[in-house]
Image (tube, grey):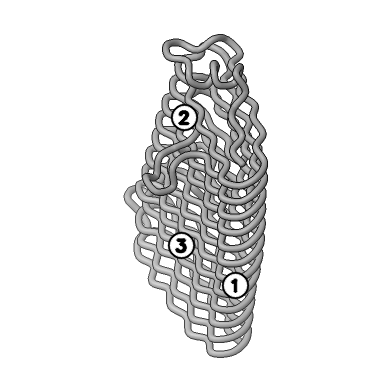
């Protein structure tokens, strides 16, 4: 069954020209094949969209064409989406928005969440997916202040986050079971921190920040099975911590110019670790590296170049 937007919601959502003050769209849909599309433009006040879909084949946007189902442009924006069932899809686009506050919850199988922002003044995004075959793609550009928290619980988890010319915040990602994977790529991100936490099975996490400034904490924690982790930074104060606990560990942390830090701790199984730091460019002191591996097939690395290098390796 398809449920249409209410007359009021439709009038607000699809009106052409400047939107009215306090533009709210609130719709609930139940059954199968539910579709929802909302567009809001040029509201001087808060434009808020709330969509709840329960059933099978719920769609916000067009998955075949990759088109967004909630579009907010040149407004103070906010989105709340809740989808329950199978084959849920939500695609949200915000462009030239101000103080956007967004929450998405998907429960079921085959969940896909796509979130894109361009030229937002400040942004927060909280995304949670529960179930299996979950996929999240977050793409943000030109956002001076942003905060992302993504959480997935279940099987076949995958999160991809990309930030360009953004800063003062960052992702905080947590995944619990099965074929985990996280990829975060940030470019020209100032004061950005990243944290990834994955619990079990085919872990993999990759973080890269290019041309970064004043980042000191990146962190990746992974616990069981086929761990790999890699963090790569470039420029200014740098940082990193990778902790992996069991099974086929491998870790790498690279830093290049300026401060560096780095620490890799791996506890059991087929460890290997590498940390390359190339610091300096008028930097006083700086660099540090510590690799601790406790059980099984150790190997380590570490190459440090400019400035006040220190290195501690402890393998047992």
Q: Nearer the viewer, mark 1 or mark 3?
A: 3
Secondary structure beneath disc 3? strand
Q: Which mark is residue 257?
A: none
Secondary structure beneath disc 1? strand
- In the figure, is residue 75 to the left or right of 185? right
Q: Which mark is residue 206?
A: 3
List x then y, in percent, for residue 197.
62, 60
Discs 1, 3 touching: Cβ within 8 Å: no
Secondary structure beneath disc 2? strand
Q: Residues within 10 Å of mark 1 (few under 14, many from 20)?
A: many
**Spatial CA span between label 1 and label 3:** 13 Å
Q: Is residue 57 above or below residue 312?
A: above
Provide the residue designation for mark 2.
71
- In the figure, is residue 282 to the left or right of 129? left
Provide the residue designation for mark 1.
244
The residue at 49%/37% (across/down) is: 92
The residue at 62%/38% (across/down) is: 81
**Nearest the eye: 118 or 88:** 88
Instruction: Looking at the image, tell me whether mark 1 or mark 3 is earlier in sequence order.
Output: 3
Instruction: Looking at the image, tell me whether mark 1 or mark 2 is earlier in sequence order.
Output: 2
Whether residue 226 appears in this view of the structure is yes
């Amino acid at each position: 069954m398809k449920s249409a937007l209410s007359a009021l919601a439709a009038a607000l959502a699809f009106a052409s020209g400047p939107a009215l003050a306090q533009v709210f769209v609130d719709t609930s849909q139940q059954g199968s094949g539910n579709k929802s599309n909302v567009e809001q433009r040029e509201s001087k006040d808060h434009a808020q969209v709330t969509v709840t879909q329960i059933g099978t084949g719920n769609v916000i946007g067009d998955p075949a064409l990759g088109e967004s189902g909630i579009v907010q442009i040149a407004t103070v924006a906010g989105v709340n989406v809740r989808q329950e069932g199978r084959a849920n899809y939500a695609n949200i686009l915000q462009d030239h928005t101000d103080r956007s506050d967004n929450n998405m919850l998907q429960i079921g199988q085959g969940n896909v969440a796509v979130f894109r922002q361009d030229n937002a003044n400040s942004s927060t995004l909280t995304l949670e997916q529960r179930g299996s075959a979950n996929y999240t793609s977050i793409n943000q550009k030109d956002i001076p202040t942003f905060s992302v928290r993504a959480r997935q619980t279940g099987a076949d988890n995958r999160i991809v986050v990309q930030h360009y010319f953004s800063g003062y915040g960052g992702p905080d990602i947590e995944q619990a079971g099965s074929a985990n994977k996280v990829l975060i790529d940030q470019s020209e991100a100032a004061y950005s921190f990243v944290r990834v936490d994955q619990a079990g099975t085919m872990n993999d996490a990759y973080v890269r920040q290019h041309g970064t400034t004043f980042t000191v904490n990146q962190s990746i924690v992974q616990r069981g099975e086929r761990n790999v982790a890699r963090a790569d930074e470039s420029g200014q104060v740098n940082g990193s911590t990778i902790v992996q606990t069991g099974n086929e560990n491998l870790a790498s942390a690279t830093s290049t110019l300026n401060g560096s830090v780095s620490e890799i701790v791996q506890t059991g199984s087929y460890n290997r670790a590498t940390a390359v730091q190339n610091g300096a460019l008028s930097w006083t002191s700086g660099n540090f590296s510590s690799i601790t591996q406790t059980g099984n097939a150790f190997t380590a690395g570490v190459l440090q170049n400019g400035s006040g290098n220190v290195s501690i390796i402890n393998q047992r």
